């Protein structure tokens, strides 16, 4: 099987079946070298624990996903979302 190259799993694509621990294990098992977790999943697992598990699995973090960033009704709300 060819190497997957710069492939990364956006954890939202499997969130109905896997939590973050399963995403990390699945990426490692299937040879997917990168992961891009969503903030809520990272929060549920804990940042330090997730970082350790990702590092131990030999994965690269390609991004950190979140939703709703620019849905505020005004500039103040958008600035607060950006700062968060």
Image: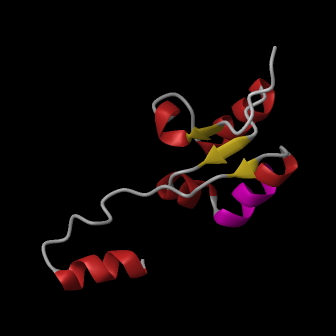
Quarter of the image containing the N terminus?
A: top right
Colour scheme: secondary structure
Q: Which residues are magenta?
A: 47-53
Residue drawn where x is 65% and y is 45% of the image: 35
Residue 26 falls in image quadrant: top right
In the foreground, 7 or 53: 7
In the foreground, 71 or 19: 71
Q: Is residue 17 above or below residue 52?
A: above
Residue 8 falls in image quadrant: top right
Residue drawn where x is 23% and y is 79% of the image: 77
Check residue 81 for magenta coloring. Answer: no
Residue drawn where x is 32% and y is 82% of the image: 80
The x, y position of residue 24, in whole percent, is 71, 40
Residue reaching furthest top? 1
The x, y position of residue 19, in whole percent, is 57, 39
Left or right for 8, reference 48: left
Quarter of the image containing the C terminus?
A: bottom left
The x, y position of residue 15, in whole percent, is 49, 36
Q: Is residue 41 above or below residue 11?
A: below
Left or right for 8, reference 83: right
Residue reaching furthest bottom? 76
Residue drawn where x is 57% and y is 33% of the image: 18
The x, y position of residue 33, in whole percent, is 76, 39
Which secondary structure class fits the magenta region best?
A: helix
Residue 66 falls in image quadrant: bottom left
Left or right for 12, reference 67: right
Q: How many marks?
A: 0
């Amino acid at each position: 099987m060819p190497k997957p190259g710069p492939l990364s799993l956006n954890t939202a694509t499997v969130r109905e079946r896997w939590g973050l621990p399963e995403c990390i294990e699945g990426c490692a098992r299937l040879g997917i070298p990168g992961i891009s977790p969503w903030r809520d999943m990272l929060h549920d697992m804990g940042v330090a624990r997730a970082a350790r598990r990702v590092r131990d699995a030999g994965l690269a973090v390609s991004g950190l996903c979140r939703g709703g960033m620019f849905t505020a009704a005004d500039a103040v709300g958008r600035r607060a979302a950006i700062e968060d």
